[in-house]
Image (cartoon, rainbow, N blue to C red):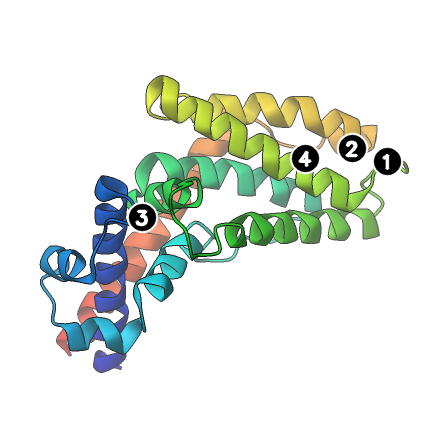
Amino acid sequence: MAQQARAIRTRRVILESAAAVFAERGYERTTIGEILVRAGLTKGALYFHFASKEDLALGVLAAQMLDEPLTPQPVKLQELVDQGFLLAHRLQCDPLVRASVALALDSGAMGIDRAAPFRAWIDQVSEALMAAKAQGELLVHVNVTDTAELFSGAFAGIQTMSQILCDRNDLTHRVLVLLRHVMPTICTPAVLIRLEMTESRARQLAVEYDANRLRHEENLTESARA
């Protein structure tokens, strides 16, 4: 157990170090040596977790996906709302997630599948919409695939604009505006009035996420010491 905890922490250190160097120098100009210096680790430690720089970049790209499942909600569209709020929070507070998104948008990052996180988000949104459709929450005209692509693309656009304009300080508000425009066009009136699309909901989710993440980090630390 202690060995597993150390391995998880080492992997996180490598990803965070790689993300920082990718953000500073760009993917193409970054070398494995620079990442090792930043991480303070040996080549053996890095290659135990990642086979190449490309493999490491894919690990950074995957970091923007939620690392813990959302709490299931009776209204499935609430889970989609919560996904948006949580990603906004992570983009504001987690350097690894910020670097992951930056890498996905780095047009100079040749040789890696930058489309993978977009496809993953579209799939995740589609899954939430399909669950909502099964419960009769969607209006009859809604096409799940088109809606998932629209929502994912719109989120990508507003987070980029927010990052450029104010370092994402207003991202939660922008996500709230997006949700308040999109949800009335896809869900039934009975469901719409039950959705909690408020900044207080976003703050509550952020506090719970941070507490769970801190608890997880403390557990790993304790396991590594054992």
- Residue drawn at x 42%, y 23% is 162
Horizontal side of residue 83 vs 7, given as left or right: right
Using the image, determine if residue 225 lies above or below residue 128.
below
Q: Residue furthest right?
A: 140
Q: Report x, y in % for residue 52.
A: 31, 69
Under mark 2, the amino acid is Ile
Under mark 3, the amino acid is Leu
- Residue drawn at x 25%, y 75% is 47
Is residue 130 visible in the rendered structure shown here? Answer: yes
Q: Which mark is residue 139?
A: 1
Q: Is mark 4 on a helix, strand or loop?
A: helix
* Of labels 4 and 2, the one closer to you: 4
Q: Which mark is residue 96?
A: 3
Report the Cα–Cα distance between label 1 and label 3: 37 Å
Q: Do the residues labelled 3 and 4 touch (CB within 8 Å)?
A: no
Mark 3 and mark 4 lie on one chain; the one further toward the N terminus is: 3
Using the image, determine if residue 92 lies above or below residue 60.
above
Q: Which mark is residue 186?
A: 2
Report the Cα–Cα distance between label 3 and label 4: 25 Å
Q: Report x, y in % for residue 216.
A: 31, 61
Q: Report x, y in % for residue 139.
A: 86, 35
Using the image, determine if residue 224 lies above or below residue 24.
below
